[in-house]
Image (spheres, grey):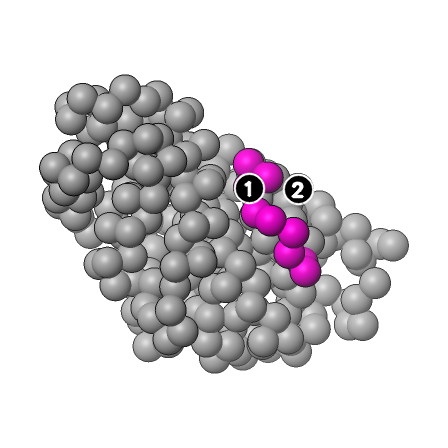
Amino acid sequence: MTTRPLRAIFFDAGNTLIHMDYDAIAAAFAREGVTATGGDVQRAEWRARVRLDASFQPGASTEHPDTGDRYLAFVLDELGVRHPATVAALTTWRRGYNPPDGLWTVVEPEAKAALALARRAGLRTAVISNSNGTIAAILDALGLGRHLDFVVDSSRVGVEKPDPRIFQIALQRARLEPGQAAYIGDLYSIDVLGARAAGLHVVLMDPGRCWPPRDCPTAPTVLAAVEQLLDRITT
């Protein structure tokens, strides 16, 4: 049971409310001779994000171009694709795909239901995202913005997760104390540790059950994560 009434749920954007266009990735792979369906790419990404999380050095920016390159390389490796020329060609494709939004253009299947459930419970909802300044526009275009009170974009506020200051900015905007808010995200070292350092409750997204044991709750979908947090209010 929480020590203070939960009054808000803050969400990561990527791999929480939205995800990459797995079908577009699979099509690009096919052009380079890599056979993989969108579902194959999705399952590989679930494993790759755990490896990406372990690769971050203290103080490194998740928005550095090298992060996207490393992420793609992990996805390819999980699919058994390691030939340097293929990896290089697909890295070039990813860097030039659909600027400035990139691949993050697909709504998670249960995202709208999760946001609606939180709002019906009387909670404020917002996004805290490490992004390049475009995430609010992306969420608006996908129909999610109207379900949010505000968006905190790292490029707009000048501080990135896991720095607790970005979570404190959201708390200040919501006029809440840390114990009154929770955060749902997909990376342990970035989302869980950052939010916890700011005093928020946390849930880690783990749709493929790929994370090793962690000292935090996990959930397979964002809707399940919201339901977990709401259970803490009523139990």
Q: Compare residues 80 and 8 and report the one nearer the observer.
A: 80
Position in image of residue 64 (x %, y %): 25, 63
Q: Is residue 27 above or below residue 82?
A: above
Q: Is residue 59 left or right of residue 208?
A: left
Badge 1 local density, few (<14 within 10 Å), some, or many (20+)?
A: some
Range drawn in magenta = 208-216
Position in image of residue 167 (x %, y %): 51, 73
Q: Secondary structure at mark 1?
A: loop
- Residue that sits furthest to the right in the current view: 235
Distance from the alpha carbon under mark 1 to that under mark 2:
17 Å
At 63% from the left and 61% from the top, the residue drawn is: 202
Would you name the residue on which mark 1 appears?
210
Position in image of residue 198 (x %, y %): 58, 76
Residue 98 figure quarter: top left
At 51% from the left and 33% from the top, the residue drawn is: 109
Mark drawn on residue 224: 2
Badge 2 local density, few (<14 within 10 Å), some, or many (20+)?
A: some
